[in-house]
Image (tube, rainbow, N blue to C red):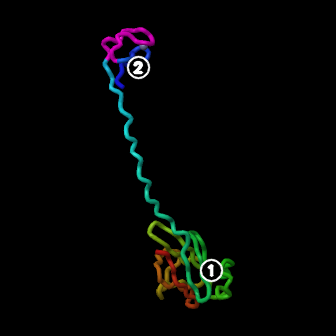
Amino acid sequence: MPYKKCPACGHKNKVNSLTCENCNCDISTVEVIKEEKGKNVLIEEPKTIIEKEEYVEFLGEDFVIKAKDGDIIGRGMESVGSEYLQNVYISRKHIKVYFKEDGWYIEPLKNTTNDTYLNGEKLEKGKLFKIRRGDIVGLSTKVKLEVKIKR
Ligand SMILES: [Zn+2]
């Protein structure tokens, strides 16, 4: 509804009013204001949230390591419970797993005595390497893990 806004008190008066219904001041020359219709509130489409993959799996000979972002894989991992990972060629803190916007990465940790391999290639310690489904991560030359990533 259009109205006349009283300059003195702000009351919204009928358009044909000459005096303010509230404070009685002269509003004969006050401009009529057309009330804005309730604007259609644009409801934003919910943004597509790229679900963070919860974990990446490393498939060993007789075990699977499920690693989350920030996890460290190494010898004697309780969660694995395989004697396989007791291998002395594996460091206690061998690689760290990262999840980034574009996928999963591993970092051969700096102070490991044992090397890490990706598809047979020796990796530099302290750097991040992207891993993809089907990649073979070697903890030393003894233990091979196949990368299992969903999708
Ligand atoms: Zn008024």
Q: Horizontal placement of 55 versus 79: left or right? A: left
| 22 is within the stretch colored magenta | yes
Residue at the spot 33% in from the left edge and 26% down from the top edge: 34
Residue 10, image x, y percentages: 42, 18
Nearer to us in this view, 99 or 140: 99
Q: Main secondary structure of the magenta part?
A: loop
Q: Amino acid at mark 2?
A: Lys
Residue at the spot 30% in from the left edge and 13% down from the top edge: 29
Rate crowding at label 2 as few (under 14), some (14 to 19) or many (20 or more) other CA atoms within 10 Å.
Answer: some
In the displayed structure, would residue 33 be above or below residue 120?
Answer: above
Whether residue 127 can be seen here: no
Which residue is identified by label 1? 74
Nearer to us in this view, 50 or 138: 50
Q: Are marks 1 and 2 in contact (CB under 8 Å)?
A: no
Which residue is identified by label 2? 12
- Where on the image, by quarter, is ligand 1? top left
Q: Secondary structure at mark 2?
A: strand
Question: Could you say which quadrant of the image residue 41 lies in?
Answer: top left
In the displayed structure, would residue 30 be above or below residue 66?
Answer: above
Q: Which residues are magenta?
A: 15-30
Q: Quadrant of the N terminus?
A: top left
Q: Amino acid at mark 1?
A: Gly
The residue sitting at the bottom extreme is 142
Question: Could you say which quadrant of the image residue 59 lies in?
Answer: bottom right
In the displayed structure, would residue 30 be above or below residue 131?
Answer: above
Residue at the spot 42% in from the left edge and 8% down from the top edge: 24
Q: Which mark lies nearer to you, 1 or 2? A: 2
Residue 44, image x, y percentages: 41, 49
The verdict on label 2 being within 8 Å of ligand 1 is no
Residue 71, image x, y percentages: 60, 72
